[in-house]
Image (cartoon, rainbow, N blue to C red):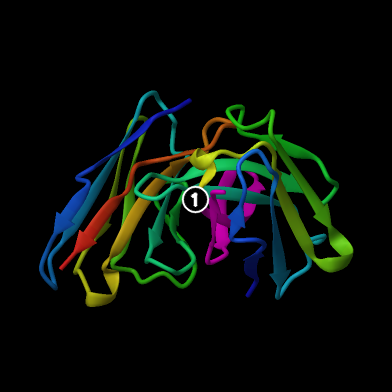
Amino acid sequence: QVQLQESGPGLVEPSQTLSLTCTVSGGSISSGTYFWSWIRQPAGQGLEWIGRVYKSGGTNYNPSLASRVSLSVESSKNQFSLQLRSVTAADTAIYYCARHVVAAGLDYFDSWGQGALVTVSS
Amino acid sequence: DIHLTQSPSSLPAFIGDRVSITCRAGQDINRFVNWYQHKPGTAPKLLIYSASTLQSGVPSRFSGSGSGTEFTLTISSLQPEDVATYYCQQSYTALLTFGGGTQVEI
């Protein structure tokens, strides 16, 4: 069974870049027709989809964040990564990575990481 | 964006109760709705996809129904381990969105 684990700094200063990595185990990031997504949840708020990356490096982003987000995949390490630029306190949230099944009319997140809390503060 | 409204936001219940959570979409989204269970500090878990298909390994007391703009997640007999927050999510549009969540408590 595939497992995902987020890692990265828990504290980022305002205006800096938030960087997180998701390590996939129990399966290859390059196999199948999966996308790999990032989702976040600010404290006391709902879930917000950030974007997704395919094994080829192709990406789709939430328009509300597209100007500040970059997703990438590193197949040799079985990892994919999130960079969010020019962060503010509003970007403080738990960040989740997830495997995204997209095939034959199906579209859902079937495996998630436990989440990484990132606080934006000086 | 397609807005999803979940109700109720909080659902107190007893062990053994049949509980239902509703998710309403701002427009017709066919059957492109998924349901997740989330317990604090853990990875969210997929329960139902495509409105009514039970994910492998999920207990049969969970079921989903609906199409168009109204969807329901039902737990036929609430168990202690079902205490969690439940979210619906739509995949009808490329911009994926989630409902606000329903906290089920005993």
Q: Position of residue B49 (x, y in %)?
A: 47, 52
Q: Nearer the viewer, residue A96 or A87?
A: A87
Was residue A113 drawn as part of the magenta stretch in this picture? yes
What's the residue at 25%, 56% (across, down)?
Answer: B103
**Above or below, B81 relative to B1:** below
Q: Residues within 10 Å of mark 1 (few under 14, many from 20)?
A: many
Range shown magenta: A94-122
How many discs mark residues in the rendered view? 1
Q: Can you identify the residue that label 1 sits on? A: A93
Q: Nearer the viewer, residue A107 or A80?
A: A80
Chain of the residue where label 1 is placed in the rendered structure? A
Residue A66 is left or right of residue B91, and the answer is right
Residue B78, placed above or below residue A10: below
Residue A29's x, y, as percent?
A: 77, 62
The one of B104 and B35 positioned closer to us in this rendering: B104
Main SS, magenta region, reads strand
